[in-house]
Amino acid sequence: MPPAFYTIPTARSPVLLTSGGNDPATPERHGQRVKVALGDQARHVVVGAAGHGVALTLPCMRDVLFRFIDAPRDADALQVDASCAKGVPRPPAFLPPTPAAIAAAASAARESDR
């Protein structure tokens, strides 16, 4: 591959980058590095209490993304209000289902099929 393949060009149109503060796959620091490389046309929104895929999995950030895309001008897109990202609560700890919970879910599914 030519060396240019591994570079990030300066953005000519608005770019919205989203990161989850708890994302082990693509951590916040990578988003920030890309934002710096893209320049003034890039905006990086971090959801501190979220993991991977914040733009499509959190209603708040889905709205931010839609407002970004629907903005009438480039300057408006870069100024979209993303303050809701600060209020996203930390997700609860994952606990594996117990046999009783599995049985209850199976029973409820059978009832709904009737």
Image (spheres, rainbow, N blue to C red):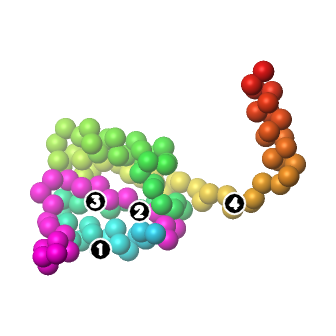
Q: Which residues are magenta?
A: 1-24
Quick check: 100 left or right of 46?
A: right
Percent across and percent down for residue 60 are 46, 46
Percent across and percent down for residue 109 are 76, 33
Mark 3 vs 2, N-terminal side: 2
Instruction: For the residues labelled 4 and 2, say whether their Cβ atoms are less than 8 Å apart.
Output: no
Q: Which mark is residue 33?
A: 1
Q: Is residue 11 magenta?
A: yes
**Residue marked by disc 3:** 43
Instruction: For the residues labelled 3 and 2, say whether their Cβ atoms are less than 8 Å apart.
Output: no
Q: Is residue 48 visible?
A: no
From the image, state whether disc 4 or disc 3 is nearer to you.
4
For label 1, the SS is: helix
Q: Which mark is residue 19?
A: 2
* Amino acid at circle 2: Ser
The residues tagged by marks 1 and 4 sit, at their Cα atoms, a distance apart of: 31 Å
Percent across and percent down for residue 91 are 62, 57
Instruction: For the residues labelled 4 and 3, say whether their Cβ atoms are less than 8 Å apart.
Output: no
**Which image quadrant: the N terminus?**
bottom left
